[in-house]
Each structure stands twice: as structure tokens, then as C-alpha cells.
């Protein structure tokens, strides 16, 4: 069946071509340039190279499981810079640099990213408007009333720009019907869904099977194999775990690593070298700062300069994490109270250190000792681990990687006091996401984000 709807990819690629061909317009309006041929060739070449380089940018961005550069504007800028440098190399290699004006090339370098980004956002806004008006929409049906399918439906309702229109829910068990929210229609049962899939009633059908239906899942999927409708699966928690796990083979038997060390062999060596090199560089740069902070702590309040607390590290092994003392107490027992806003235990110097994350600096010595990494899941007090491992499934799998001075959860806003279970769940969610997607480039992104974002975090106190 030929899809007669407008292709978003085609629209965006056309916009990219118009943007990179802006060099021709620059050459035309530049008063000292008369021959447009070299600029036309460069523009066409850039159009081809942009798509070619873009494929490698996507591969580069996806290291670690999901895109590294989630912001589309950032991906466009990186792709354009790589395209421009490659094109300049070709021009010089062909000894054709005399055919071009440096002014036009420099202007092209800076103007094109603006055109690329603005054209994307304008097109997205236009598509959203068209879809709101009912143009270029797709009708979908959801089979199975589960927590995952209801969350998916709510997400679609919150993003009308997707153009997906929910026709309703099919039920696959008799117990599901009462659980369908009133804003969604009940459009049939399993047999009705199979018939609709065969006749192409809907543009897409999303399948979400209730827990305990694994024995019948294979039969349902086989019956859907002769349909003309695209079928997509909304995974449950178990299936999601499988999809995020890595396959392996042992003794001619295929295996799936559900909970395993994410870094082994060469990857572990790269991570360790990264930690040692960066820690030595950072400690050399901040040595005077460490001395001044130590003096300020000693003068301002009685007690030790450093605060040491037992934490769980890689595979749950215990170690002592080092921090500059920021409180009047040094709790390290079975009952550890988290710092709260306006906590009377925090000293004046400590308040500044905690707000700017400077109290974490001694942990670079933990990194050199091999107990921590610069980037990884933040280590929690052992008392908190004992508490939350009973409340959050998969909580202790955070310890499949060395704890870090900073982490993916912290730069995404899940830092500071976890006064609700939801906050800790989100922190764990980002920690496990980092473990699945680890790469050197993701580490560097987190380090840079920490330097610019969390040094004055509102959640730090």
C-alpha cells in the first residue's frame, strides 16, 4: 500500500538543500563576485555531503544506546560544521580556493546553521498546525488496556503535532473494558482488532498485552503476520528490560545479559584512563582552591576538614567517600538524615560549598584510588540504599558501575534532597539509562553540563 501522506523526511531534506544552497544567494548579492558557477557547485556538493555526513552524525550520536545529542539544533550544527570542513578540504585539495571569496565562505559558515535550525522549527510548527487542522494525520488504534498503553495514549494527546489520532482501544480480555478512560472509545475485542488489521482500517495498530499473556503472545503475533496494517508493540517492563539488554553466546547457547557489568575489557580500560587523566589535570588546576577551602572550614567551625562516610561502590563493595565537611555533624551510622532546605546543621561555609558543589572536590582522590569515577551514579549513604532497595525495583543495579562525582541524573535536574519516592525513582531511572548508554562522549557532555549547570543548582542545599 503506497503511503500518500506527506513525508516529513522529504520536507526536511528539501529545507536542508535550500539552506546549504544559500551560498549561491550570498555570491549573487556580493558586489565583487560575478561568476556564480563555483558557488553553485559548492552548494550542490554541500547538499550531498550534508546528507552523507548526517548519517555518520546519527551513528556517532547513538553511541551508548540512545542519541547522544538529543537536541536537534545541536545535531544540525555539528553536521554542518563537519560538512563545511570537509568541503573546504576538497576545495583546497582541488586547488580551487582562488575561485572563492573568503568573506562569502565565512558568512556561509555562520548563516547556514541559523537557516538550518530556523527552517526545521518553522516546518515543525507548520506541520503541527496542519495536523491540528486534520491535514496529514494518521488514525491509530491501541489493542490492550495496560498501564503502558494508557501512558502512551496520554502522551499522544499531549503532543498533537505528531498527527496521531487515537480511534480507540481494543480489549483482549473481558476484565479490561471498565479500565478504559472515558475520553477513549471501546472499539472492539481481539477478534475485531484482527479483522481491522487485515482490512487496513487504521494506519497503525499499537499492541500492548497484559501481564501473564506471554503464552498467547506468539499466537497473536502469528495471526497478525498476514495483515496489511503496520503493527507496533508497546513493551511491558519485562520486554523493555530485554530490549535494553545485550545478547551473548556461551557454549553454543544464546544468552541475554539482564543485569551485568556494562564495562568490561577495553571499555573498562578506557573509562579508567579517562578518570585518571582528567582527575590529575583537575587536581593540578584546583590545588590552591582546595587549600583555601580547607582553611575556611577549619577557621569557621570546629571539627575535621574532611567528612568521610561509608558508601556502596562497584558491585556493592563498601568504601569511604571524601567530602569537605559542610555540617556541624558527621553522620555515618545506620540512620542518616538527608540535608534539607534551611537545615540548621549546615555551616555558613558549608552552605556555599554545597550550593556550588565544591564540597565534592575531594572525591577526585576517591577516583584516583579506584573507588569512584568522575561520572557515574551518585553514591548514596548505605542507610538510604537499605531503605530504597525495598521500594524501587532495580535500585541496586546502579552499582553495576562505579559511583561518580557527578552523573546523568544530576545534570537532568534530579539532584539534592529526595523527599519523595518519585524523586528517587527519577534519579534511579536516569542512572540506569546512563549505565545502558555509556560512552566517553556522554561522560564529556555530563562533565561540561556539570560545570555550567549544577554549580548553582537550586536543588543543592
Image: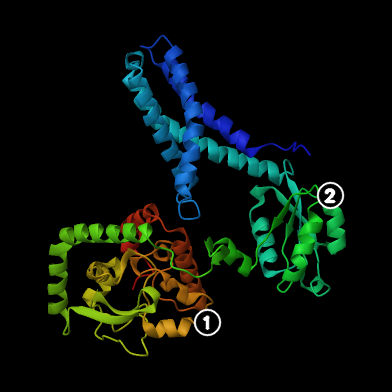
* Residue in the picture at 46% in, 76% down: 396
Q: Position of residue 117 (x, y in %)?
A: 49, 38
User: In x, y percent, where is residue 216?
Assistant: 77, 68
In terms of depth relative to the viewer, which is nearer, 223 or 18?
A: 223
* Badge 1 density bin: few <14, some 14–19, many ≥20, Cα 10 Å: few
Q: Residue at x 71, y 69 (%)?
A: 146
Give the image quarter of residue 120.
Answer: top right
The x, y position of residue 429, in whole percent, is 50, 68
Q: Nearer the viewer, residue 440 or 223?
A: 223
Query: Is residue 354 placed above or below 310 in the rendered structure?
Result: above
Residue at image x 78%, y 49%? 229
Secondary structure beneath label 1: loop
Q: With 191 as the anchor, is 156 left or right in this view?
A: left
Residue 117 seen in this snapshot: no
* Disc number placed over residue 321 in the picture, else none: none
The Cα–Cα distance between marks 1 and 2, rounded to whole angstroms, is 44 Å
Mark 2: which secondary structure? loop
At label 2, counting other C-alpha atoms closer than 10 Å, the crowd grade (few under 14, some 14-19, many 20 or more) is some
Q: Is residue 90 above or below residue 320?
A: above
**Where does the C terminus fall, quadrant-wise?**
bottom left
Q: Which residue is mark 1?
A: 391
Disc 2: which residue: 201
Q: Earlier in the sequence, mark 1 or mark 2?
A: 2
Amino acid at each position: 500500500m503506497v503511503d500518500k501522506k506527506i513525508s516529513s523526511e522529504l520536507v526536511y531534506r528539501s529545507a536542508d538543500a535550500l539552506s546549504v544552497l544559500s551560498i549561491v544567494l550570498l555570491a549573487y548579492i556580493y558586489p565583487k563576485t560575478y561568476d556564480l558557477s563555483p558557488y553553485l557547485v559548492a552548494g550542490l556538493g554541500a547538499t550531498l555531503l550534508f546528507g552523507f555526513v548526517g548519517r555518520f552524525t546519527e551513528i556517532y550520536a547513538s553511541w551508548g544506546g540512545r542519541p547522544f545529542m538529543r537536541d536537534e539544533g545541536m545535531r544540525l550544527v555539528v553536521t554542518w560544521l563537519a560538512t563545511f570542513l570537509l568541503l573546504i578540504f576538497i576545495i583546497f585539495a582541488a586547488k580551487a580556493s582562488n575561485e572563492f571569496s573568503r568573506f562569502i565562505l565565512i558568512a556561509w559558515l555562520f548563516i547556514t546553521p541559523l537557516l538550518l535550525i530556523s527552517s526545521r522549527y518553522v516546518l515543525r510548527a507548520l506541520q503541527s498546525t496542519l495536523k491540528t487542522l486534520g491535514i496529514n494525520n494518521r488514525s491509530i488504534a491501541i489493542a490492550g488496556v495496560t498501564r503502558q498503553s494508557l501512558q502512551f495514549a496520554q502522551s499522544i494527546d499531549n503532543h498533537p503535532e505528531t498527527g496521531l489520532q487515537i480511534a480507540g482501544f481494543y480489549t483482549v480480555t473481558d476484565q479490561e473494558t471498565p479500565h478504559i478512560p472515558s475520553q477513549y472509545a471501546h472499539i472492539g475485542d481481539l477478534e475485531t482488532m484482527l479483522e481491522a488489521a487485515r482490512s487496513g482500517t487504521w494506519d497503525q495498530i499499537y499492541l500492548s498485552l497484559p501481564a501473564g499473556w506471554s503464552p498467547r503472545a506468539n499466537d497473536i503475533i502469528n495471526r497478525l503476520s498476514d495483515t496489511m496494517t503496520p503493527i507496533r508493540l508497546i513493551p511491558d517492563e519485562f520486554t523493555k528490560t530485554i530490549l535494553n539488554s545485550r545478547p551473548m553466546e556461551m557454549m553454543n547457547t544464546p544468552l541475554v545479559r539482564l543485569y551485568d557489568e556494562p564495562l568490561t575489557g577495553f571499555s573498562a580500560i578506557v573509562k579508567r584512563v579517562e578518570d585518571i587523566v582528567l582527575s590529575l589535570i583537575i587536581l593540578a588546576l584546583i590545588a590552591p582552591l582546595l587549600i583555601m577551602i580547607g582553611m575556611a572550614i577549619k577557621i569557621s567551625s570546629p571539627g575535621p576538614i574532611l567528612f568521610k562516610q561509608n558508601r556502596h561502590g562497584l558491585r556493592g563493595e563498601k568504601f569511604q567517600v571524601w567530602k569537605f565537611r559542610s555540617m556541624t555533624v558527621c553522620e555515618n551510622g545506620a540512620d542518616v538524615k538527608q540535608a534539607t532546605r534551611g537545615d540548621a546543621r549546615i555551616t555558613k561555609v558549608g552552605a556555599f560549598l554545597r550550593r556550588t558543589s565544591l564540597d565534592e572536590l575531594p572525591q577526585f582522590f576517591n577516583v584516583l584510588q579506584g573507588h569512584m569515577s568522575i561520572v557515574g551514579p551518585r553514591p548514596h549513604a548505605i542507610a538510604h540504599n537499605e531503605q530504597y532497595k525495598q521500594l524501587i525495583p532495580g535500585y541496586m543495579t546502579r552499582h553495576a558501575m562505579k559511583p561518580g562525582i557527578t552523573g546523568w541524573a544530576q545534570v537532568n535536574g534530579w539532584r539534592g534532597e529526595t523527599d519523595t519516592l518519585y524523586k528517587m525513582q527519577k534519579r534511579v531511572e536516569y542512572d540506569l539509562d546512563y549505565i545502558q548508554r555509556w560512552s566517553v562522549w556522554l561522560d564529556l557532555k555530563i562533565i561540561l553540563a556539570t560545570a555550567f549547570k549544577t554549580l548553582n543548582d537550586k536543588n543543592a542545599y
